[in-house]
Each structure stands twice: as C-alpha cells, then as structure tokens.
Image (cartoon, grey):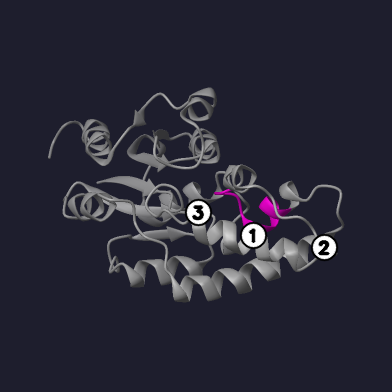
Amino acid sequence: MKLVVFDVDGTISDSQTQIQHAMTLGFEAVGLPAPSRAETLSIVGLSLPVAVARLAPGHEAATHAAIVEGYKASYFTHRAASPAPLYPGARDCLMRLAARDDLLLGVATGKSRRGLNALIAHHGLEGIFVTMQVADDHPSKPHPSMLLEAMAETGSRPAEALMIGDTSYDIEMAAAAGIASVGVAWGYHPVADLRAVGAAIIATDFAALDAAVDAFLGGHA
C-alpha cells in the first residue's frame, strides 16, 4: 500500500473567494487596508498566523492575533452561507483513487480541523482519507511535520508516499519529508514557482493527475 496525500485549498477545493473575503474583513477589523487578491493567494497553504504575519509585516503580535480572529469569524460565517466548491473533476478523481486497493489517501492542509471537517461533510467525502493532518496540530508548511505524521499513522516509508499540491509550500514540504510530489496547474501559485522549488511533474488537469498517480503506483490500476 502506498500513501497519496492531498493539499486542500487550491488543489481539491477552490476556496479563494472565501479566503479573500475573510482576509479582507480581518484586516478591516483592525483598520488596515486589505491585501490584494494576489497577495492573499500567495500565502494560501500556510498556517493562518504565519500567513497573517507575512501579509502584515511590521505590525505587532496583538494586531496579527486580532486579524486572525477576525478572519476565523468571517470565514466561518461565509462558509456556512456559501461553502467552497470542489474543482470540477476533483470528487471523481478522489473516489477513483479511494476505490483502489493499492493505496491510502491522506490530507495535509493549512486549514483548521473544523474547516476541513466542514468541507468533507458538505461534499460527502467522509471516510476516504485515512490520515488528515491540519494546521491545528503542526508547524506551518513547508515544515515536514504533517507528512511525517501522515507516514507514521499509515506505516508508510518516504519512498511509498506522494504529495499533491498547488503551492510551492507543498512541494517544499514534500522535499523536506523526503517524498515525491506532483504539482497541479489549476491552483494558487504559478507553475513557474512550483518548478522553481523542484516540482518535476505538473498535472494540468485531473486526468493528468490520475496518470501521475498511476505512474507512482507502478502503472497498476
């Protein structure tokens, strides 16, 4: 059995609208101008406190904490009213992979456990991920802690694990954990950024991702 670990935001789920809205309200709550969409998308994948600190350099910890709390409150409200959609083809891809008897599926995300559980429940993905690593329990990406714990939970070795993600943080995290990675082209970081940190394989759609996973598994469907 091999382990395939997915990032969530920008890889499975297109949550940019919710993230941008919540970040805007979090900054406005402390009287600061909101970051641009490009600035916000550049930090997707990082744990929220780390992301906010990057977006508001030069401000004190209390300000960062207030932005984080504002973000959380706004994201929770917006998520309840308008849950983030899955990318077209994501659900079918996940279900096909989950049906295989030669791999296990996992998640490594900068989302909170509450946020991840809500997304899984909304889209009916319960039970397909055997390991779910979230920001609540680990240092921010690209620290390898999430992947190391995912491998520990599933009894996988680095040679038996694969990380799939849309940001440079995902690719760097995989490298730090000593595992292979596949970047996806439809997410929030430019493909050039993924290649710059070592992504040798870029999937341009979910069919290409299926093929990349199949190649990782040795070509046996």
Category of crowding for the residue at label 2, using alpha-carbon neighbours closer than 10 angstroms: few (below 14), some (14–19), many (at least 20): some
The Cα atoms of the two marked residues, 2 and 3, are separated by 23 Å
Determine contact: label 2, label 3, CB under 8 Å.
no
Category of crowding for the residue at label 1, using alpha-carbon neighbours closer than 10 angstroms: few (below 14), some (14–19), many (at least 20): many
> What residue is pinned by disc 3?
16
> What residue is pinned by disc 1?
23
On the rendered structure, is 217 left or right of 157?
A: left
**Quarter location, residue 63:** bottom right
Q: Earlier in the sequence, mark 2 or mark 3?
A: 3
- The percent position of residue 190, horizontal first and vertical second, equals 50, 32
Category of crowding for the residue at label 3, using alpha-carbon neighbours closer than 10 angstroms: few (below 14), some (14–19), many (at least 20): some
**Residue sitting at 64 percent across and 44 percent down?**
39
> What residue is pinned by disc 2?
63
Q: Earlier in the sequence, mark 3 or mark 1?
A: 3
Circle 3 SS class: helix
On the rendered structure, is 88 left or right of 65?
A: left
Does 36 sit above or below residue 61? above
Query: Three-letter amino acid code at disc 1?
Result: Met
The magenta stretch spans which residues?
44-52
**Residue sitting at 54 percent across and 23 percent down?**
196
Circle 2 SS class: helix
Does 87 sit above or below residue 123? above
**Residue sitting at 40 percent across and 67 percent down?**
119
> Looking at the image, which residue sits at the far left?
221
Determine contact: label 3, label 1, CB under 8 Å.
no
